Image: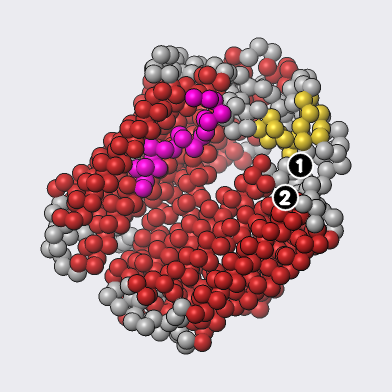
Amino acid sequence: MPASRDSLWFLIAGPTVWATHFLLCYVVGAVYCAKAGDIDANLGAVRLTVAIITVIALGLIVHAGLHAFRNWGFGAEDPPHDDDTRSDRRRFLGYATMLLCGLSFVATFYVALPALIITSCR
Amino acid sequence: MRINLMPLYAWYLLVVAAMILFAFPPLIAGDILFEMERLLDWPFFDPARGGDPVLWQHLFWIFGHPEVYIIFLPAIALVAMIVPTFARRPMVGYSWIVLAAVGTGFLSFGLWVHHMFTTGLPAISLGFFSAASEAVAIPTGVQLFCFLATLLAGRVIYTTPMLFVTGTLAIFVIGGLTGVMVALAPFDWQAHDSYFIVAHLHYVLIGGALFPILAGAYYFFPFVTGRKLSDKLGKLAFWTMFAGFNVAFFPMHFTGLLGMPRRVFTYPSGLGWDWLNLMSTVGAFIFAAGFLVVVFDVLRPKRKQAYAARNPWNAGTLEWLTEMPGADWGVRSIPIVESRYPLWDQPDFVKNVDEGRFYLPDAEEGKRETLVTSVLDATPIQCLRVPGNTFITMAAAFLTGGVFIFTTYHWYLAALVSGVFALGAIIMWLWNGTAMVPEKNEKDVGLGLNLPLYMSGPKSVGWWAMFITMIGDMTAFASLVFAYFFYWTIHDNFPPPDAAPGVMWPLVASALLIAAWALTQMARRWNRAGNDHALRLALIAGALLSAAGGAAFIWGPWTSNMIAAAHVYPATVWVLVIWTASHAALGIIMQLYCVARSLAGKLTAEYDIDIWNVSLYWHFMAITTVVTFAVIALFPLAA
């Protein structure tokens, strides 16, 4: 991949997916329960929606993570990547992006967990 | 300095700056609603007329929780600078700390409802926020482990700043652990609004902000004044404060668990809280005594004290280039940085900087200049002239403040006058200090490099400043739209059937404002093509259309007799149209400013920063217009 395509924006790919997933989960759950008007309303549809967007979100994060893994050079060189060279700068960004994807994966998975066990709007 | 070499402090500050952009505007939106209720009795938070105080809680805590990290991250960033200096080695896990800073920045936006666990929201909502609140412990913990690993791998020198850092780590870890406890909704239901929370938040903020800031104060005092603070007094202050803090706040965990609520000034005796509170009181006095030692140390006269040696802590980071005391010009030349710790690693670094062997060693034209570089590899791309010292900006700030302060006291005329003068001051500063046409196109910045002095559009810093400002502005607008949909979720008749203002006037308003947007964009192109008459005509026509568009937005609810004080629905519509109309008014000022700049010869085909920035503003104005139209006119048809 040519170096000109590197961008600082890519660093936040994973967390951005997490944020979008989080917002969607919250909005879907909150609007559904507010509009259901029944504290015991069944969350079936919400849980299914959360499951679907979680699979999509985790897929996107893994995709970004693999891309970052490639930019890092598949771990051929160990950190700290602190040389004043374009390739070390690239490895650093790849590595940091990959770490952030890892964190985003765990955080997205965490956020989806309540939908596994909570069945009503109570 | 490539981005993989950037000081960790800068990484943290970059994250915090982005957080501020998204965290503060919801509070501004909440304040707008709050002031409308306070001044004009618009019922946003009054349940009798459809309002809901929970909306305030949402808007406040969407700001409030990220704010905790906005306080914490810059303080912990000081720790990230101090630890390597006194461990005498580079930071272990630099990339992991970047992960921690960026990760915390994001996750902190998914935590706000954990302040609202007892407001009766559905369990599924609490679950999402509880999960995110647990997840944020990961990046927060990661950076602490990096600090500990660096200290373990190095040879630590326990100076006063380092003592405060160790205090930080000890105290903050306890606050963090109780944070993991209260992030669990069932535990929070027990501990909410009790002294347990008081203990938790003080362990977090005194450990996570006050101690690191004091570490930073001792560490950077010579940087600022050229002289060190007293090591003896610093150690005395640290131990007194550390002991006093723990004696004062640790017992509060137990007072809280014993049921003592927050925010009470007295309580009946015999509830088992007495001796714990007595202990806290004693601790508070010890803590305050320790702080007084710091205050004394800072204030005591130091004229007879010798200046500190240059780089007094033998640090490796760039800021310690400064002379003791600092020179008027800061550093002599802008260095090429090749290491994360250039003062340790780059031979003759300080000498070369001092002798002006890097960029911009002199100011030949006597102007204040800096380098603009590429983001990732710091390749110099522009020599930027920045405005010099002036009191106009201070005047603008005070006058802007006057608008809000006078409004608070209902002195509307004074507020108006203050606003007009504020506008005048801002325009005066813009006119004289920004987008200056340079006397030559390029300049030699040293090391055989010639750089342009003027760049416009997405290459200019001003364009990005407008972009960033408008992202904040759009966040505030999105918060107002959120308020609309919040009321929609809690009411069955929001918007009511046949809701005013209908479609016609909002549609007319939107069409006019979109036409103004199109003319502004065309004005920029015509100007580039060298047709300055077309620029002026298009902008004047655009300003007239904007005025008509803003008025049409107001006209809709006005002629449909929407009384804002009657119910939250008309109030919400009014807030959205006033927001849009006032942005149209700002757009008019910008359009006319460009006309004036063009007439004065400060805006030309070649030097066109102003119209680029104004046309960018108008992109956001167009989005605001379309969203307002969709919300107030189209959504009632669909709902």
- Residue B538: x and y in percent read 73, 65
Label 1, label 2: how far apart the Cα atoms are: 9 Å
* Res. B156 visible in picture: no
Disc number for residue A16? none
Q: Observer-nearest residue: B167 or A27?
A: A27
* Res. B511 visible in picture: yes
How busy is the neighbourhood of tag 2: few (under 14 within 10 Å), some, or many (20 plus)? many
**Looking at the figure, which quarter contains the C terminus of chain B?**
bottom left
On whether residue A19 falls in the magenta region, the answer is: yes
Taking the spot 81% from the left edge, 62% from the top edge, the residue there is B533
In terms of secondary structure, what is the magenta stretch mainly? helix
Q: Is residue B461 left or right of residue A40?
A: right
Taking the spot 69% from the left edge, 24% from the top edge, the residue there is B335
Q: Is residue B407 above or below residue B2?
A: below
- Residue A109: x and y in percent read 25, 39
Q: Which residue is mark 2?
A: B609
How busy is the neighbourhood of tag 1: few (under 14 within 10 Å), some, or many (20 plus)? many
Could you say which quadrant of the image residue B300 lies in? top right
Judging from the image, mark 1 belongs to the subunit labelled B
Residue at disc 2, secondary structure: helix
- Could you tell me the amino acid type at mark 2? Ile
Taking the spot 49% from the left edge, 80% from the top edge, the residue there is B504
Q: Which residue is mark 1?
A: B454
Residue at disc 1, secondary structure: loop
Q: Is residue B45 left or right of residue B619?
A: left
- Residue B41: x and y in percent read 45, 80
Judging from the image, mark 2 belongs to the subunit labelled B
Q: Which residues are magenta?
A: A1-20
**Looking at the figure, which quarter contains the N terminus of chain B?**
top right
- Could you tell me the amino acid type at mark 1? Tyr
